[in-house]
Amino acid sequence: MPIDNQTKQSFFRFTTTRPVAIFMIVTGILVFGWMSYNQLPLNLMPDISYPSLTVRTEYPGTAPEEVETTISRPIEEALGVVSNLYTISSVSKAGQSDVILEFNWETDMNDAIAEIREKLDLVFLPEDAKKPIILRYDPSLDPIIRLGLSGGPDLFYTRYVAEEQIKRELETVDGVAAVKV
């Protein structure tokens, strides 16, 4: 709806004839804006829940090839039909299988976990294999900074410098929660 000429004139007349009122309105907006800005939380690592899960199964004393054929593949086949699954992949190491499940962003992860548990109960695993556990990825546990240290041929001295000098120095920095070597 177009604004007629008379409405424009009355608005401009009000703003030019009452500068104190306009000043108070602008000042009020600025004060409330500043107060709101100061109350906004600042978080370097915002709370984001990634729609991914890892099914970890330990099978002590086995080679990666055997872990892949007896643990990873059967779990992948059973979980490949889970609803809202985006991708599935696995990593087989000596004595351990990790099956990584990535879901669509709108997926309710509690429902996904329940469905995964149902499917895992139907998978036949070797007797020596431990029961699979479901892990959620939490990005807030990831380190913010990683440092690499290199030195000469004396690795013991390099480790000593890392543990006794660098670690102690970083632990005294304000805001550092933990230092791990």
Image (cartoon, helix red, strand yellow):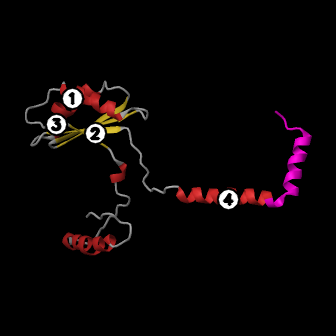
Q: Which mark is residue 54?
A: 2
Are discs 1 and 2 less than 8 Å apart at CB? no
SS for dot 4: helix
Relative image position of residue 174 (x, y in whole percent):
38, 70
Q: Is residue 24 left or right of residue 60?
A: right
Q: Earlier in the sequence, mark 3 or mark 2?
A: 2
- The amino acid sitting under disc 3 is Val
Front residue of this view, candidates 74 and 156: 74
Identify the magenta region.
1-20
Alpha carbons under labels 4 and 2: distance apart: 48 Å
Alpha carbons under labels 1 and 2: distance apart: 13 Å
- The amino acid sitting under disc 1 is Leu
Task: Single out the mark in the foreground, 4 or 2.
Answer: 4
SS for dot 3: helix
Task: Single out the mark in the foreground, 1 or 3.
Answer: 1
Task: Single out the mark in the foreground, 3 or 2.
Answer: 2
Q: In which quadrant of the rendered image does the C terminus lie?
A: bottom left
Using the rendered view, name the quadrant where residue 87 is placed. Answer: top left
Q: Is residue 8 magenta?
A: yes
Q: Earlier in the sequence, mark 1 or mark 2?
A: 2
Q: Is residue 21 left or right of residue 139?
A: right
- The amino acid sitting under disc 4 is Leu
Q: Which mark is residue 67?
A: 3
Are discs 1 and 3 less than 8 Å apart at CB? no
144 shown above or below 109:
below
Alpha carbons under labels 3 and 2: distance apart: 16 Å
Residue at the spot of label 4: 30
SS for dot 1: helix
Q: Residue at x 85, y 57 (%)?
A: 18
125 shown above or below 46:
above
